[in-house]
């Protein structure tokens, strides 16, 4: 959306790009309203080139991100956000197709966490999620993804204790 790649309803064009400052202010307004109502906030983005630093500046309690789309700069921004107190909801499980093994997924998350120099103990605060929503998934598929997320979270928790 920030980059202006979102197609119009007709499909013949794209919506104009939004200035990062405008997007940040709009998201911050929503986050502030939710906090004023006494609730906790998580901002989700599952797009390539996620503006992690911008999202972290909105004051959200957590960032929910498709970690498969994070490059080194994205992970550095995640590390900065985590160090500043924002929680990470790591989208590590695909919402369609075969599910990767628990150890493979947990190992990838632990490796990325280590690469950016975050303490392993901090992984105990990470929420393991699918990369994006499950609205289009069949109930059995959605249950399988969520069950795998629980397995991965347990494995990550064990590795965080090492």
Image (tube, rainbow, N blue to C red):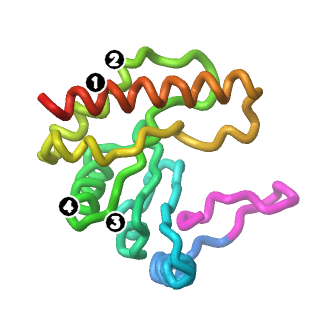
Residue that label 2 marks: 103
The CA distance from mark 1 to mark 3 is 25 Å
Looking at the picture, tell me which residue is in the foreground, 2 or 144.
144
Looking at the picture, tell me which residue is in the foreground, 66 or 90.
90
Residue that label 3 marks: 53
Marks 4/2 in contact by CB < 8 Å: the verdict is no
The CA distance from mark 3 to mark 4 is 12 Å
Residue that label 1 marks: 107
Q: Residue at x 63, y 43 (%)?
A: 133
The CA distance from mark 4 to mark 2 is 26 Å
Number of the front mark, 3 or 4: 4
Q: Residue furthest front?
A: 38
- Residue 98 lies, in percent from the top left, at 58, 16
Marks 1/3 in contact by CB < 8 Å: the verdict is no
The CA distance from mark 2 to mark 3 is 29 Å
Number of the front mark, 2 or 3: 2
Q: Residue at x 43, y 24 (%)?
A: 151
Q: Residues within 10 Å of mark 2 (few under 14, many from 20)?
A: few
Which quadrant does the C terminus fall into? top left
Establish if 157 lies above or below 33. Answer: above
Establish if 150 lies above or below 64. Answer: above
Q: Which image quadrant is residue 71 in?
A: top left
Q: Residues within 10 Å of mark 1 (few under 14, many from 20)?
A: some
Give the side of residue 4 with respect to residue 81, left or right: right
Write down the region rendered in magenta: 1-15
- Residue 114 lies, in percent from the top left, at 16, 38
């Amino acid at each position: 959306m920030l980059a202006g790649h979102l197609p119009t309803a007709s499909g013949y064009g794209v919506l104009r790009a939004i200035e990062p400052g405008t997007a940040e202010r709009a998201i911050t307004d929503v986050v502030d309203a939710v906090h004023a109502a006494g609730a906790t906030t998580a901002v989700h983005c599952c797009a390539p080139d996620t503006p992690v630093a911008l999202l972290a500046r909105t004051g959200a309690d957590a960032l929910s991100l498709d970690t498969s789309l994070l490059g080194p700069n994205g992970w550095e921004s995640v590390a900065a956000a985590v160090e500043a107190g924002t929680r990470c909801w790591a989208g590590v499980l695909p919402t369609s197709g075969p599910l990767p093994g628990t150890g493979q997924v947990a190992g990838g998350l632990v490796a990325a966490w280590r690469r950016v120099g975050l303490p392993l103990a901090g992984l105990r605060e990470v929420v393991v999620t699918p990369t994006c929503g499950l609205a289009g998934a069949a109930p059995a598929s959605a249950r399988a993804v969520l069950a795998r997320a629980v397995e991965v979270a347990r494995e990550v928790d064990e590795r965080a204790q090492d």
